[in-house]
Amino acid sequence: MDTLAERNMTPEDLPLFRDLSASSRAELLKNAIVHGVGLGTVLFEQGDIPNFQLVVMSGSAQLFGKSASGREVLIEVVRAPDLVIPAAVVTSTPYLMQARVPEPSRFLLIHATAFRAAVAAEPALAHVVIGSLALQFRRMVRQIKSLKLRSSTQRVGCYILALAHQQGTPGRAVFPYEKNLIASELGIARESFSRALAMLENAGISVDGQEITIHDRALLTAECSPDPLIDDIDVR
């Protein structure tokens, strides 16, 4: 780990600090550190009390939920420049998920007590935190609607359409991580995920490893009924 000064980084690199007063920025950053981690690193376990507010500077963090029996599901992926579970940090309550890193990544770590004090004192920082919480809340609502309103095949098809949209390639998509993790993120078993992909071959797609080709986007759209209030994509 190294300090921000040693990295020659400035606070303006992160939206979190852009509107802060100089004194508040200095107070937050004087003991902040940049932490680079490798694939598979566990940042914290569910049940841990936050010691830091983590901000993704590059890469990502996967958030997993675990049952008492040890079953694990992927809940969400947090990417730069978002905050990692600020709700737990602001309320000083246990994390409800484990955070694990799927790729080499870098995080800014701000001491939790200093972060809470700054949120209470600085309206500009409170505004950023509220915005982050609102975006995370909306992502969770979209996910719950998809789980409750769609079949597993519809979920997979809409995921592929959204993925192609995000990657900027309407006729093609590449799964960003292992299929078993995508299945758990969509709330279905790995076997059901494979069956859904096979069924969607009749709706205009083909799958080769991690790559999906969308041969007939209109047919796939008709089969899966994407909804902009769930998928956050252009459904035309």
Image: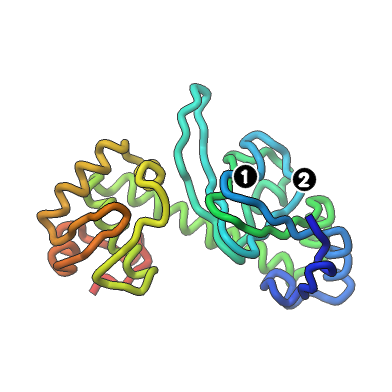
Residue carrying label 1 = 41
The picture quadrant where one finds residue 219 is bottom left
The scheme the figure's colours follow is: rainbow
Q: Nearer the viewer, mark 2 or mark 1?
A: 1
Find the residue positioned furthest to the left.
Answer: 202
Q: Residue at x 49, y 22 (%)?
A: 69
- Which part of the image, by quadrant, shows the N terminus? bottom right
Q: Is residue 131 visible?
A: no
- The three-letter amino acid code for the residue at tag 1 is Thr
Name which of mark 2 and mark 1 comes first in the sequence. Answer: 1
Q: Nearer the viewer, residue 62 or 49?
A: 62
- Which part of the image, by quadrant, shows the C terminus? bottom left
Residue 51: which disc?
2
- The three-letter amino acid code for the residue at tag 2 is Asn
Q: Is 223 placed left or right of 191 in the picture? A: left
Residue 159: which disc?
none
